[in-house]
Image (cartoon, rainbow, N blue to C red):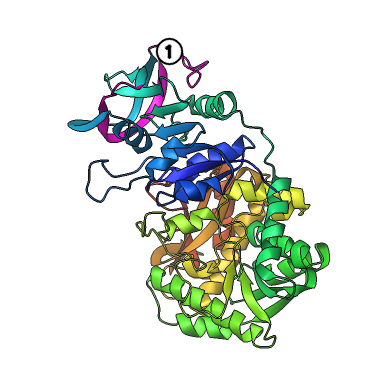
Amino acid sequence: MINKMIAVIDFGSQYTQLIARRIREQNVYSEIFPHTYTAGDLRKKNIQAIILSGGPSSVYNANAPQIDLDILKLEVPILGICYGMQLLIKNDGGNVRNKGQGEYGFSEINKLEDSILLKNITNPSKVWMSHGDEVDNLGNRYKIIARSSNGVIAAVEHKEDTKYGVQFHPEVIHTIEGEKIIKNFLFKIASCNPDWTAANFINESISKIQDVTGDTGRVITGISGGVDSSVVGTLLHRAIGERSSCVFIDHGLLRKGEADQVMGTLKDGLGLNIKKYDYTENFLYSLSGVIDPEKKRKIIGEQFIRAFEKIANKDDTAKFLAQGTLYPDVIESGGSALGPAVTIKSHHNVGGLPEDMDFKLIEPIRDLFKDEVRKVGEELGLPEFVINRHPFPGPGLAVRILGEITSEYISILQEADDIFINILHETGEYNKIWQAFAVLVPTKTVGVMGDARTYENLIALRAVTSVDGMTAEYYNLPHNILNKCANEIINRVRGVNRVVYDITSKPPGTIEWE
């Protein structure tokens, strides 16, 4: 069991999860809590330190998120980031104001005096700023330890207590020495031990699953064959054995040969209790004539649940559904500690779920990013090709066929995608890429094949590099490989006469095309 943790208090920052992630990267356990948590709540968590996140509000707004002031009296180190720093200062006699000109993007900070928090930081040091308000007056209890090149108070330290604040964001990669600052806080100030590992996460997850399900509770575990659901299926199997029934739903929107491959890997390779069910007809009928991608995702989310419910009806004791939800799914579906965030797209396993479910959800990896899940998979002993398998969306090819879904379009895309992925394997490029796939665009173009005019479909190829899926850069595939992909797709896939390569990063685009 984990005895000590870093509590990250969330005030609605888009970077809050990154804070927790940067902490876990140092093998220190962390959890995110809403700003409504009280000091009493935190005392039950046996916390070792507290980090106050940034946020979009002004500390003086009437509806601005506040903090239980008793939290600031807890005898543990506290680090406030951006809005978190402003809260510290405001509640300790200082002043924060909006001068009408904020700082956004890169800036440089200059250390004014020695501080443990900024130990071994170069002078000046490049940081990432994102704030409208700024600290104007520290009061009597804090001192300035760094200013930005614009003269803004960039870092502060309490004169008596182990409380610190930074106006910039050390958790983002754009703050060049952000990792040093976080490590200074964790190890030099909070005296943390780097003892949180994938093995610890596994043990903790198994314990939680056993507590939730009790001695008799049965669980249906949704399996897709990717690393996320494979990790969840393995965790459930280790926690409750045969009481976890792994279910693979063939919805007719899988890649070529995928159903047989998944069943062979998980049933024969890992020994999971897994069964395949074919619900192709149900899914395709429900998607007939649907063009809007958001509607597609919600339909697919509901169809998955209804399929699981039908399967569960055969066993009245199956009251739980386990699935491989990740934190990026939650973020893009509008999840936030402060309420609904902007919905980028509803993931079928989050925003696409119907309200009237017969199941209680078990989501062991909900707070993890993809790279963290892979580390857990390695610790569980999953095969390398499962661990490094590119992400594949739960809705499958439904979100890679733009516009209406037809049997013809599914067949075309399956063949094109198969050629693309096989070439990446053959050329040694596959494991250099985070995600790669083909997209069928509902646009016909004129071509010339065999001296004859053609009017056929367009295939777009996409390959990106990423760490966590929250941002991504297009992968610079060599031209000779792109040429090979285009030639083989056009020559081997009937109904395609043009191939393009997507070089859009995320942002402004998404990884998928919808």
Residue 118 at x, y percent in the picture: 47, 19
Q: Which residue is mark 1?
A: 123
Residue 55 at x, y percent in the picture: 35, 43
| On screen, residue 57 above or below 224 | above
Residue occupying image coordinates x 43% and y 65%: 346
Tell me if residue 194 can be seen: yes
Residue 338 at x, y percent in the picture: 37, 54
Direction bottom: furthest residue: 314
Q: Amino acid at mark 1?
A: Asn
Residue 115, magenta (yes or no): yes
Tell me if residue 253 can be seen: no
| On screen, residue 256 above or below 129 | below
Describe the element under mark 1 as helix, strand or loop.
Answer: loop
Direction left: furthest residue: 100
Q: Decide if residue 429 is on the left or right side of residue 58.
A: right
Q: Decide if residue 422 is on the left or right side of residue 358.
A: right
Magenta part of the protein: which range?
A: 112-141
Snapshot quadrant of residue 345: bottom left
Residue occupying image coordinates x 47% and y 80%: 356
Q: Nearer the viewer, residue 103 or 227?
A: 103
Q: Quadrant of the C terminus?
A: bottom left
| On screen, residue 401 above or below 191 | below
Residue occupying image coordinates x 55% and y 49%: 483
Q: Nearer the viewer, residue 341 or 429?
A: 341
Residue occupying image coordinates x 34% and y 38%: 83
Q: Nearer the viewer, residue 176 or 495?
A: 176
| On screen, residue 79 above or below 504 | above
Snapshot quadrant of residue 136: top left
Graded by Cα atoms within 10 Å as few (under 14), some (14 to 19) or many (20 or more), the crowding at tag 1 reads few
